[in-house]
Image (cartoon, helix red, strand yellow):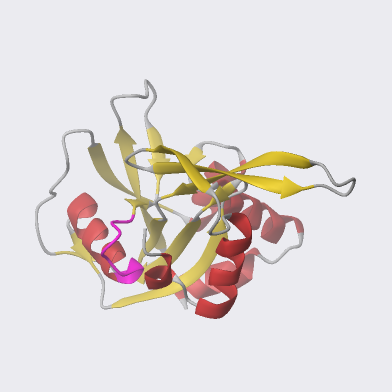
Amino acid sequence: MNLERFCLDKKSDLNFFEKMIPKAAKIVFDGERYTVYQRDQMMYDGTCKNFEAIQSLWSAQVICTKWDKIVLSKQQQPHREDTFFSFFGGMLDEWEEPIDWAKRELLEESWMTSENMFFYKRFNKMWFNNYSNFFVAKDVYKIADQNLDNGEKIEVVEMSFDEVINLIVNNNFRTNLEFTIHIMSLKINNRLDEFKNILFN
C-alpha cells in the first residue's frame, strides 16, 4: 500500500507508520486486506523480542444528512446473521483518494450524492497500522439506482440525530470503535451539540 497517498500530514503520518512498521520489518503474511509484519525489538535489559504489527487497508465512512435527518444503511451481509445499521462506507482501494472513494461508495450503496461533502475526522484503529476516515455529506439526494456487490443487501433509512446517537452508544451500530468512543466522550462531556452543528448547520 502506498501510504503517502493517504496521508493528510505527510511528515507526522509517515513518521507514525515508520515507528509502527520499520523498514527492517519482515512480511510473514500478506492477504487481500491485511499484511502482518514481524520485527526484532531491543528491550531495556539488552535482550530482543519479536514484535508484530498489522497493516490493513484504510477505510472510510460517510455521515449523510438530509433536512433534519441522518441517512443510514440498514443492511445484511453473508457472514452475519443479524441486520445492522451503519454509515455508508467500507475499505479504500489503494489507488483512490479517500474523498473520491467516499463519493463513489456513497453512490453505489445509496444511489445518492451530495454537493457539500467534506472531511470530518480520522481515527487510528488500536493495534492496527490503519486509519478510518470519516466524511460528512450534507443534503444528499438520489441520482441513480443502487449498484451493490453480491455480498450486500442495503436499505436506505432516515433517523433523527438522537436515534442515531442512541444506536451508537448502545452498541447497536456498526462503525469504527474509536469513532464510538469519540461519540461517547462528546455525550459524557455534554458536547454533542458541537457534532450536531457540524452535521446540520
Q: Residue furthest front?
A: 46
x, y percentage for residue 138?
Answer: 35, 71
x, y percentage for residue 125?
Answer: 57, 51
**Is residue 146 covered in magenta?**
no
- Chief secondary structure of the magenta span? loop
| Vertical relation: 71 (above or below) 194 | above
x, y percentage for residue 141?
Answer: 21, 66
Q: Residue furthest right?
A: 45
Quarter of the image for residue 95 reads: bottom left
Q: Which residues are magenta?
A: 92-99
The answer to whether residue 104 shows anywhere in this view is: yes
The image quadrant where one finds the N terminus is bottom left
Q: Is residue 190 left or right of residue 101?
A: right
Q: Is residue 163 left or right of residue 101?
A: right
Which residue corresponds to the image point at 40% horizontal and 40% vertical from the top-left?
Answer: 85
| Vertical relation: 106 (above or below) 99 | above
Q: Which of the two residues, 43 or 113, is positioned nearer the viewer here?
A: 43
Which residue corresponds to the image point at 31% horizontal and 47% vertical from the top-left?
Answer: 157
Figure disc tally: 0
x, y percentage for residue 132?
Answer: 48, 57
Quarter of the image for residue 191 reads: bottom right
Q: Which of the two residues, 23 or 139, is positioned nearer the viewer here?
A: 23
Q: Residue furthest top?
A: 81
Q: Which of the two residues, 2 or 80, is positioned nearer the viewer here?
A: 2
Which residue corresponds to the image point at 61% horizontal and 72% vertical from the top-left?
Answer: 194
The answer to whether residue 9 shows anywhere in this view is: no
